[in-house]
Amino acid sequence: MTKQRFTKLYKFLFEDSTFNKLSIKAKLLYALLTERQNLSKLSAKQHGIQSQFIDDNGRLFSIYTNKELMNIINISEPTVINLKKQLIAFGLLEEIRLGKNKPNRLYPKKPYDEYFYVHDVDEFYRLPHSLFSNPKYKNLKAETIVAYAVYLSRYEYSVYKNHFSDKSGEIYCHFSNEKMAEF
């Protein structure tokens, strides 16, 4: 396997029934927002409290303009706004408006319960950056991108565990259409 940059598509979005009604595009948007949040966290670690990504309350935030998100996911601005509203409704995002012509502050959240959360919030599928940056993949639907990430994860697990190989030694993954349809 070669090293490549990737975005984390968190598994709890698919395993926790709370998020069954959250659209695939919203889950993809959440992956991008949390990745940007991780970059903000890295900046804060490097620059300390003077980081441009720490608000007056000491909370870490990130910035993504609607236009940037439109270009990355290849969707319209009303769709971006709708997807953010979905994430807010599911408790996965807080958005603070800063005023006209200023980008909003975005605070992606993880689904923590104060005492117990049954799903591992840190497990993820890998979304290769090339799916967003290579023009060849620009018109892929969100569902296709997510399916690729799931199949890639299963394939890499097969390679790691040497679970599935055919008579000629070729490695493959096993994931039923019914299981994929649940996503």
Image (cartoon, rainbow, N blue to C red):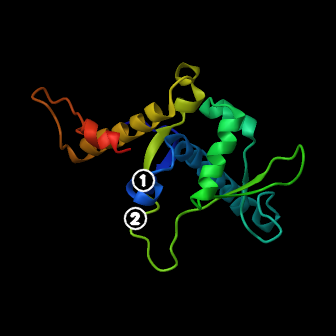
Between 168 and 124, the residue placed more toward the observer is: 124
> For numbered disc 1, what is the local secondary structure?
loop
Which residue appears at 46% of the width and 62% of the height?
121
Between 96 and 5, the residue placed more toward the observer is: 96
Lower sequence index among marks 2 and 1: 1
Left or right for 33, reference 12: right
Left or right for 25, reference 154: right
> What whole-number distance in Å separates the C-alpha atoms at marks 2 and 1?
9 Å
Q: Residues within 10 Å of mark 1 (few under 14, many from 20)?
A: some
Total labels drawn: 2
* Residue 83 x/y as whole percent: 62, 45
Residue lying at the far left of the rendered structure: 167
Q: Which mark is residue 142?
A: none
* Residue 93 x/y as whole percent: 64, 57
- Residue denoted by label 2: 119
Left or right for 28, reference 53: left
Left or right for 172, reference 100: left
Q: Quadrant of the N terminus?
A: top left
Answer above or below: position of 82 versus 165: below
Answer above or below: position of 42 versus 29: below
Which residue appears at 55% of the width and 22% of the height?
139
Amino acid type at mark 1: Lys
* Residue 19 x/y as whole percent: 47, 55
Q: Residues within 10 Å of mark 2 (few under 14, many from 20)?
A: some
Kindly indicate whether the residue at mark 1 contacts the one at mark 2 (C-beta within 8 angstroms).
Answer: yes
Amino acid type at mark 2: His
Between 182 and 62, the residue placed more toward the observer is: 182
Which residue appears at 43% of the width and 57% of the height?
12
> For numbered disc 2, what is the local secondary structure?
loop
Q: Which mark is residue 11?
A: 1
Q: Quadrant of the C terminus?
A: top left
* Residue 48 x/y as whole percent: 76, 66
